[in-house]
């Protein structure tokens, strides 16, 4: 393994890194990882990024709550609720890539 068939597994590495790939797909990827050092290295990098994102989301969420608690009568300053990937602690840049959706550069 390694090299020629890696492209079939690359799309699932990010989901696998955060523990959200399930069933046969996870088993298949796990078997591939045992024999593929390049994919294991990429998975390690993705896990590092996922860990940093989760950590920053916890910090950011705590900072927002602290600000709401210290300013009397202030809740969301007229802002609506957050939706999509951001609510889950993933920024738009991570959800769509650095160039964003619909950009062709």
Image: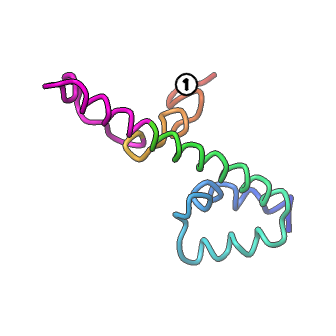
Regarding mark 1 in the picture, which secondary structure is present there? loop
Query: Foreground: 105 or 89?
Result: 89
Q: Nearer the viewer, residue 82 or 22?
A: 82
- Residue 14, given in percent of the width and then of the height, sits at 61, 54
Q: Residue 93: x and y, percent? A: 53, 32
Q: Is residue 81 magenta?
A: yes
Q: Residue at x 60, y 29 (%)?
A: 98
**Which quadrant holds the C terminus?**
top right
The colour scheme of the drawn protein is: rainbow
Residue 23 colored magenta?
no
User: Is 86 located above or below residue 15 in the figure?
Assistant: above
Q: Residue furthest left?
A: 73
Residue under label 1 = 103
Q: How many marks?
A: 1
Q: Nearer the viewer, residue 97 or 55?
A: 55
Q: Which residues are magenta?
A: 60-85
Task: Please identify the quarter of the rendering in which residue 74 is found.
Answer: top left
Image spot of residue 103 (x, y percent)? 55, 25
Q: Residue at x 69, y 61 (%)?
A: 9
Compared to 18, does 64 lie above or below? Answer: above
Residue pictured at 67% horizontal, 74% vertical? 28
Where 57 falls versus 21 (above or below)?
above
When asked about the image quadrant of residue 104, the answer is top right
74 over 3 or under it: above or below: above
- Asked where in the image residue 49 lies, by quadrant, the reply is top right
Relative side of 75 to 3, left or right: left
Residue 57: x %, y % from top left = 46, 41
Question: From the image, which quarter does the N terminus lie in?
Answer: bottom right
Residue 88 relative to residue 78: left or right: right
- Label 1, residues with CA under 10 Å away: few <14, some 14-19, many ≥20: few
């Amino acid at each position: 393994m390694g090299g020629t068939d890696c492209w079939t597994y690359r799309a699932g590495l990010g989901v696998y890194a955060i523990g959200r790939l399930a069933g046969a797909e996870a088993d298949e990827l796990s078997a591939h990882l045992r024999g593929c050092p390049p994919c294991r290295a990429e998975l390690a990098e993705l896990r590092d990024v996922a860990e940093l994102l989760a950590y920053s989301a916890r910090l950011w969420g705590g900072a927002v709550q602290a600000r709401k608690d210290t300013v009397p009568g202030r809740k969301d300053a007229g802002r609506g609720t957050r939706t999509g990937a951001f609510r889950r602690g993933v920024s738009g840049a991570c959800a769509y890539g650095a160039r964003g959706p619909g950009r062709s550069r």
